[in-house]
Each structure stands twice: as structure tokens, then as C-alpha cells.
Image (cartoon, rainbow, N blue to C red):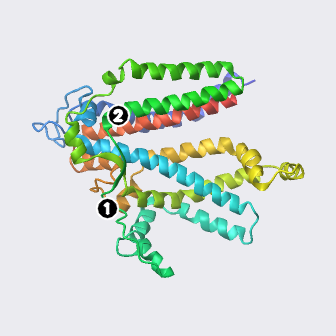
């Protein structure tokens, strides 16, 4: 049992870290939230860079403008791009990384060489990756002319400037989509906990699923989700959906991070005893069932951790998009780009702080369930 003296020494050793974290992380986070509720850079009578600038508190007005004003449609478009980038990047990186892991797990000739090749993109920064792939995705060369090697006609696709929009939707319907998605996830968890006879968890998720439906039926979303000022004008100006110009950026991101996923899963598979594999094979288990029923389920903790890491990376993506398509491409804009343009080009520090705060809240929504699961598992 630790003595009081040991605890004091531990506290003394950790005190510098706490002080630095408090100043350079939480203090500046607090200042960002504070600035997001001011008119810093929004009041023409008070230039943002004026030495004696006066910042007036405007409450949640900046957030309301970002979510409803037709002039701020670029921000809502950036949220949509961030969502689709998150989905396709995480799923793509996990899928490609898992495929590479299974291939290397077959003890192929030259395994070390291929593992190094697959992992090498991870050594590059997103700026270098973006520069390389920007060359490869030029409309008049690169991947578009790759089929000509096989005698096929070239591809005609404008990777980073395509005007095509897939999976179009209306911003006002987002609450309904969120409700259905939340209900589906909670219902799935309820059934899963019920089959495992974890009654307490099943009751909680079931109650939350019913609550989600009640929120939709009661019309509470209409008070939470602010309506757009000019929905028709926004649909004509910048319809919401998956911008095809993001495809090239997603491919580049998967190319860089799939090797990282491969390294994590390979380490996990190599940590599983060979006796377990042999026992399964003796019992007549085929290779496909060996992976789907025995090996991969044991990688679930690694899978969750990897999804969280990739998700965190995708939500705050900036440098890859900046390097590939620049800060002024409306089709590929993400919140990180808007923080840069509004804060360092337009001097709209209040709106830039509001965007950064919203991204922080989204990241917290992703991270907190992971921490809950991890802490619950350790308990």
C-alpha cells in the first residue's frame, strides 16, 4: 500500500505536467470557447487586429449564424465533407489494412520486404502525401492514363475539382437521419446485450432507443435544430451531399494510413498462440472460419482503438486537404480549412473559434464512448 510520502512524491513529479497541460491545453481551449461567444472580427467598427480592440459578448450568435445563415453555407458543406471523409476513410483504412494483414499472415516469401513497403507511407507527412497524390490525380495524367498501359482508353475524371454530388440530402432532414441512425445502433446494442444476458446494459440501451424515438415524435428536434434562413437558396447554391472531389483525397489518406492499421493488426495476430490455430484446424475449421470466428474476434479491442485513432485523425484533417486541393476549393473544404481561412485570412476570429469549438465537441462525442468502453472493460 502506498504511503502518504509516496503520494506526495508522485504528485510533485507530475505537477509540472499538470501545470503545462493546464496552461497550454485547457486554458487555451477555454479562451477559444470564450472568443467564440464574442464579436471579435465581426464588428466593422472594431478591426480585429486593433491593439485596443473591444470584444463584446454575443452569446451563441456565432453558432446560430454558422448553422442557419445562407452566407455560412460553406461551413455546413464542410461538416458534410468531414462526415463522409470520416466514414469512407475509416472503413477504407480498416478494410485495406485488414486485407494486408491477412496476406502477410500467410507467411509469404519476402514478408519483411512487403511489410516495410506497406508501412513506408506512414513515415511521410500528410503534406508530402498530398503533394505526391496531387501529381498522380492530375486530369491530364497520372491515374487517368493508367489504363492506357493495358491498351484501354484513359479515364476522364476530374479528381479534385469534380462538380458531381452523390447521396444528396436536405440539411433540415439531418435530425431525422440522426434519429434513425441512433435508434438502429441502440436497438442493435439492446439485442446484443439481451443475447449475452447483460440485463442492466440491455435496459439502458433499450430505454435510450425509446427516448430517441420520443424526441423525434415530440417535435423536440424543431427547437434544438435551428431552421435555415433560406433553404431553397442554399440548395441551389451548395446542395448537401458527398462531393466526388473528395474521392482522391480519401484514396490518398487510405494509402497513407492502411499500413499503420496493418502493423497494429499484424502485431495482434502474432500475439495469438499458434496452438489455438492448430487446434482449430484439427477440429476441421477452414481458413475463412479460422479468421472470422477465432482470430479476428480477438482483435476487437485493437479494432476499437484503431477506429478511434483514425476517426480522430479524420475529424481534424487539414494538411492533406490543403496540400491536395488548396484552401479555396469549396468542394473539398473541411472545418480545419475554414478555421484557417476565417482566422488568418478574414480575421474573423470569433467565427473561427466557433468552428474549432464545434469540431472539438464532435471529437469529444467520438472519444468519450471509447473511454467509457475501455474503463468499463478494465473495471
Residue farthest to the left, as pictured:
45
The location of residue 171, given as percent across then percent down, is 32, 37
Query: Where does label 2 land, which residue?
Result: 173
The location of residue 222, given as percent across then percent down, is 31, 23
Seen at 41% across and 37% down, the residue is 360
Figure quadrant of the N terminus: top right
Marks 1/2: CA–CA distance: 27 Å
Q: Nearer the viewer, mark 1 or mark 2?
A: 2
* Of 368 and 82, the residue lying toward us: 82
* Of 345 and 362, the residue lying toward us: 362
67 above or below 119? above
Q: Is residue 321 visible?
A: yes
Query: Taking 199 as reference, is 314 left or right?
Result: left
Seen at 17% across and 36% down, the residue is 53
Element marked by disc 2: helix
Seen at 73% across and 60% down, the residue is 105
Query: Taking 326 as reference, is 89 left or right?
Result: right
The location of residue 293, given as percent across then percent down, is 75, 45
Element marked by disc 1: loop
47 above or below 166? above
Residue 233 position by quadrant: top left
Figure quadrant of the C terminus: top right
CA neighbours of label 2 inside 10 A, class few (<14), some (14 to 19), many (20+): few
The location of residue 339, given as percent across then percent down, is 31, 45
283 above or below 14? below
CA neighbours of label 1 inside 10 A, class few (<14), some (14 to 19), many (20+): some
N-terminal-most mark, 1 or 2: 1
Query: Taking 46 as reference, is 277 left or right?
Result: right
Q: Which mark is residue 161?
A: 1
Q: Is residue 71 visible?
A: no
Seen at 61% across and 26% down, the residue is 190
Q: Which mark is residue 87?
A: none
Amino acid at each position: 500500500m502506498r504511503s502518504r510520502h509516496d503520494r506526495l512524491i508522485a504528485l510533485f513529479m507530475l505537477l509540472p505536467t499538470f501545470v503545462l497541460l493546464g496552461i497550454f491545453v485547457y486554458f487555451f481551449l477555454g479562451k477559444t470557447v470564450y472568443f467564440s461567444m464574442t464579436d471579435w472580427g465581426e464588428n466593422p467598427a472594431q478591426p480585429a487586429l486593433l491593439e485596443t480592440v473591444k470584444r463584446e459578448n454575443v452569446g451563441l450568435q456565432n453558432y446560430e449564424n454558422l448553422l442557419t445563415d445562407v452566407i455560412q453555407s460553406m461551413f455546413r458543406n464542410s461538416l458534410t465533407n468531414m462526415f463522409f471523409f470520416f466514414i469512407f476513410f475509416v472503413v477504407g483504412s480498416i478494410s485495406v489494412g485488414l486485407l494486408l494483414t491477412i496476406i502477410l499472415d500467410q507467411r509469404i516469401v519476402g514478408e519483411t520486404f512487403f511489410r516495410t513497403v506497406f508501412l513506408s507511407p506512414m513515415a511521410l507527412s500528410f503534406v508530402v502525401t498530398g503533394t505526391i497524390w496531387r501529381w498522380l490525380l492530375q486530369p491530364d495524367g497520372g491515374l487517368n492514363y493508367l489504363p492506357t498501359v493495358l491498351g484501354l482508353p484513359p479515364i476522364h475524371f476530374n479528381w479534385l475539382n469534380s462538380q458531381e454530388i452523390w447521396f444528396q440530402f436536405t440539411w433540415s432532414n439531418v435530425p431525422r437521419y440522426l434519429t434513425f441512425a441512433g435508434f438502429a445502433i441502440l436497438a442493435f446494442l439492446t439485442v446484443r446485450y439481451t443475447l449475452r444476458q447483460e440485463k442492466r446494459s440491455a435496459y439502458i440501451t433499450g430505454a435510450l432507443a425509446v427516448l430517441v424515438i420520443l424526441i423525434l415524435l415530440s417535435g423536440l428536434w424543431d427547437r434544438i435544430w435551428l431552421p435555415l434562413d433560406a433553404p431553397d437558396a442554399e440548395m441551389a447554391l451548395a446542395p448537401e451531399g458527398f462531393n466526388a472531389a473528395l474521392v482522391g483525397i480519401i484514396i490518398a489518406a487510405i494509402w497513407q494510413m492502411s499500413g499503420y492499421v496493418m502493423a497494429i493488426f499484424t502485431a495482434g495476430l502474432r500475439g495469438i498462440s499458434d496452438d489455438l490455430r492448430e487446434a482449430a484446424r484439427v477440429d476441421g475449421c477452414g481458413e475463412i472460419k479460422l479468421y472470422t470466428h477465432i482470430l479476428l474476434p480477438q482483435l476487437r479491442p485493437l479494432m476499437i482503438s484503431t477506429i478511434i485513432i483514425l476517426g480522430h485523425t479524420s475529424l481534424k484533417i487539414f494538411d492533406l486537404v490543403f496540400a491536395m486541393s488548396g484552401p479555396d476549393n469549396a468542394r473539398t473544404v473541411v472545418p480545419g480549412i475554414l478555421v484557417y481561412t476565417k482566422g488568418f485570412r478574414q480575421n474573423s476570429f470569433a467565427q473561427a473559434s466557433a468552428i474549432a469549438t464545434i469540431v472539438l465537441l464532435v471529437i469529444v462525442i467520438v472519444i468519450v464512448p471509447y473511454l467509457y468502453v475501455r474503463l468499463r472493460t478494465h473495471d
